[in-house]
Image (cartoon, coloured by chain):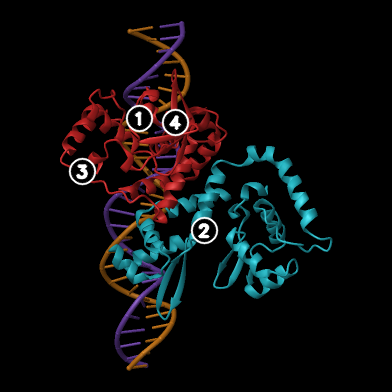
Chain colours: A cyan, B red, C orange, D purple
Amino acid sequence: MQLDKIVNYHKALSDPTRLRILLLLSKGDEIHGQALAERLNLSQPTVTHHAAKLREASMIMERRDKNTVYFKMNPEFIKAGSNASLNFIFSKGTEEMEQQSPESSLKESVLRNFFAKDGRLRQIPAQYKKKLIALQYIVEKLEPGTVYSEKSINEFIQQFHEDFATIRREFIMHQFMYRENDKYELNPPEMWTHWENVK
Amino acid sequence: MQLDKIVNYHKALSDPTRLRILLLLSKGDEIHGQALAERLNLSQPTVTHHAAKLREASMIMERRDKNTVYFKMNPEFIKAGSNASLNFIFSKGTEEMEQQSPESSLKESVLRNFFAKDGRLRQIPAQYKKKLIALQYIVEKLEPGTVYSEKSINEFIQQFHEDFATIRREFIMHQFMYRENDKYELNPPEMWTHWENVK
DNA sequence: AATTCATTTAGATATATATCTAATTATATC
DNA sequence: GATATAATTAGATATATATCTAAATGAATT
């Protein structure tokens, strides 16, 4: 159930130690486990404990070098979770009903005007809402739960448009996908930037 | 400390029952305690328990009619908390240091004598300096950077005193807040009338 | 004053979790 | 292989909290 994901997001952030860890990581630098333990005045197992919780919530990423584990913050996911949580609480069911007809006609218009009959994208829409619609149309052809290499993502995008680098970047930027160590994976629709327009 | 407020915000949202309550309230309608208990299949004391948590986090408001208590969501505060949390994690918060000057004794005396133990303002101090202290105490519970509607400001003030119109006017008069098109926003402390006493 | 109804408080129980120390595992170096 | 270092797991403990039933309170009506 979706509820649990929201609960877990807030559980991850409902502990002062974990917030302090994120605060330390928020400059963008990597910090390894022992350093965290020292700066927080905690034992190493305690750091491991909290790191596991944060990792489960996708809020940090870990990289191993020799026998040292470096932590790095995953800011997009923290923001995306916040977004998803508000979307859930204010369940976008009612308002979007009204918006659905105008939205869907815009969607149809974008698909008709920006995509050729062979399915290729003529050009990337400059207008924000239209761009998101086009990106979503493409990204929905990917397989949820599959891990893609950068190479295979590039090839996939090239089926639609030659400028795969731009589109790949947009996928990440708008949180259609998430990247870790050059591996790409689809995000659930709730995390997409314009989630409220999706359904 | 600021950290605790963020922790409490996420604690309030890190329970499935409380999220379901907010979901039920998200349409904007009022729901009374027993109805909530029935719709959630929970005992009434459990509802009271969760309502208390949500009230502490300013996420709901309560209104009593005869012996029935009606709950209503406080959406602005939920969004404001989300905002504040992200600002905290990404260290964009206002670098505020709460330091008390020699006149902290007056401040303490005002807080002790004019505020009841439930946090409500017994009466608006007539004496200028004391009034400013009381106003400041209330206004500091607002979140910097958040834009409030007039309605939500009224509701916020009513948590402390029934005469929201007077207090709202004082907020503007002494430049605790600034208003534009019925939107209210906190001013930075440097703009407050008695700034020299704040630091 | 007695009654009724909704809510709250008290007290009990079960589960979750934050933290520690001690033991174990993983990785690299000698 | 032996050793060193960092991390993790196991196990213990203390605290927090979600839920219930039973009792008490608050508010209106008879």
Judged left or right of residue A95, residue B153 is left
Report the Cα–Cα distance between label 4 and label 3. 32 Å
Judging from the image, mark 1 belongs to the subunit labelled: B
The residue carrying mark 2 is A77
Q: Is residue A73 above or below residue B49?
A: below
Residue ID for mark 1: B173
| Foreground residue among A41 and A82 | A82
**Position in image of residue B39 (x %, y %):** 55, 33
Which label's residue is closer to the chain start, 4 or 3? 4
The residue drawn where x is 41% and y is 64% is: A51
Q: Position of residue A130 (x, y in %)?
A: 69, 53
Which structural element holds mark 2?
Answer: helix
Residue B135, relative to residue A75: is it above or below?
A: above
According to the picture, the residue beneath numbered tag 3 turns out to be B100
Q: Nearer the viewer, residue B147 or A186?
A: B147
Residue that label 4 marks: B61
Residue drawn at the location 37% of the way across and 62% of the way down: A24
User: Residue B64's image quarter?
Assistant: top left
Three-letter code, disc 1: Met
Amino acid tagged 3: Gln
